[in-house]
Amino acid sequence: MKEDINSFLTYLTVEKGFSENTVAAYHNDLYQLADFVEEEAAKVGYPASWASFNRQGMLSYLLNLKERNYAATTVARKIAATRSFFDFMVAEGKIKDNPSHNVDSPKVGRTLPKPISISQVRRLLEQPTKLSAPEAKRDKAILELLYASGMRVSELVSLNLSDIDLEGGEVRCFGKGRKERIIPVAPRAILSVKEYLQESRPHLTYSDTELALFLNRRGERLTRQGLWQILKGYAKSAELDKEITPHTLRHSFATHMLSGGADLRAVQELLGHANISTTQVYTHLTTEHIRRNYEKSHPRAK
């Protein structure tokens, strides 16, 4: 059971860009949940499993938390961690339903995404050009494509050679629920991918039958964890003063698009959000940007 939790924690780190402290909190919360499930299963003599944990079990867990006199904010965090974990398990096809749905918990504020500036993005994307190894052109293509498309890291590492249209300047990816979308890609990113395919990928592949677009040193499909480590290295060499994850580039893509005047619905489609309310979180950031410029520039703003 805890192997599933560890997979989820990796997803939070690499895909969602959660901080180390937040992931550590989720680790503690979900291991506590696993212990509770195992203890409850032992009472009735059944093997513990996530598939057998239902809504009634979730209500019992919530009651158990309240009996321990946790603060409301702590209970809310634990329930939020549990709900996110079970959403992940459903998406992975390991359970059919999320037992925490329709289980009330204290409301928690939504964390706003943290993009980096255009100048910081530029500095980050320049880092691979300073290296000569075959991986450098691969890394340049990855970073350019992430920022140019706003794809999730899981979507990017899942790309096959047939998913990139170099002539049409488009990439096809499959988001949550295997929903397909076609994303137009800026010429600079397309050029980086083309250079990678011509000059770098042949040095990385060991098989003509490998379909993956981006390969690791073993000639296998690059993993989310591998991409995250690559990005961490370049963020460090770029001397960026904040924690950068693959999801940071997705946040930055959305924020910079909206700041540049892009339509909210268009950005929703590009990001693959099912609901526009998910995309609207970025409008707060762009509104703040406008406000700062107004207060800086208007003669009667002070």
Image (cartoon, rainbow, N blue to C red):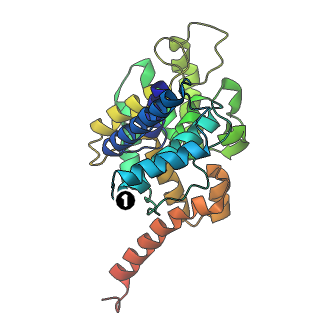
Position of 80 with respect to 236 (left or right) is: right
What amino acid is at disc 1?
Thr
Q: Is residue 83 visible?
A: no
Which x, y percent locates residue 28? 35, 39
Outermost residue on the front side: it is: 44
User: In this orientation, does residue 266 appear?
Assistant: yes
Describe residue 282's horizontal placement relative to residue 235 as left or right.
right
Residue 45 in which image quadrant:
top right
Q: Nearer the viewer, residue 139 or 187?
A: 139
On the rendered image, what quadrant is the C terminus found in? Answer: bottom left
Left or right, 48 with respect to 94, comes to: left
Task: Count every numbered label the image shows and give the total.
Answer: 1
Whether residue 300 is situated above or below residue 168 in the rendered picture = below
Residue at image position (71%, 35%) is 167
Taking the spot 56% from the left edge, 47% from the top edge, the residue there is: 150
Q: Nearer the viewer, residue 6 or 130?
A: 6
Residue 32 horizontal/vertical position (percent): 39, 38
| Residue 286 vertical placement versus 27 (above, below) | below
Using a 10 Å C-alpha cutoff, classify the residue at mark 1 as few (fewer than 14 neighbours), some (14 to 19) or many (20 or more).
few
Q: Residue at x 71, y 37 (%)?
A: 178
Please provide percent x and percent y for residue 215: 53, 20
Q: Quadrant of residue 166?
A: top right
State the SS at label 1. helix
| Image position, residue 142 (x, y; %) | 50, 33
Residue topped by disc 1: 73
Q: Residue furthest bottom?
A: 300
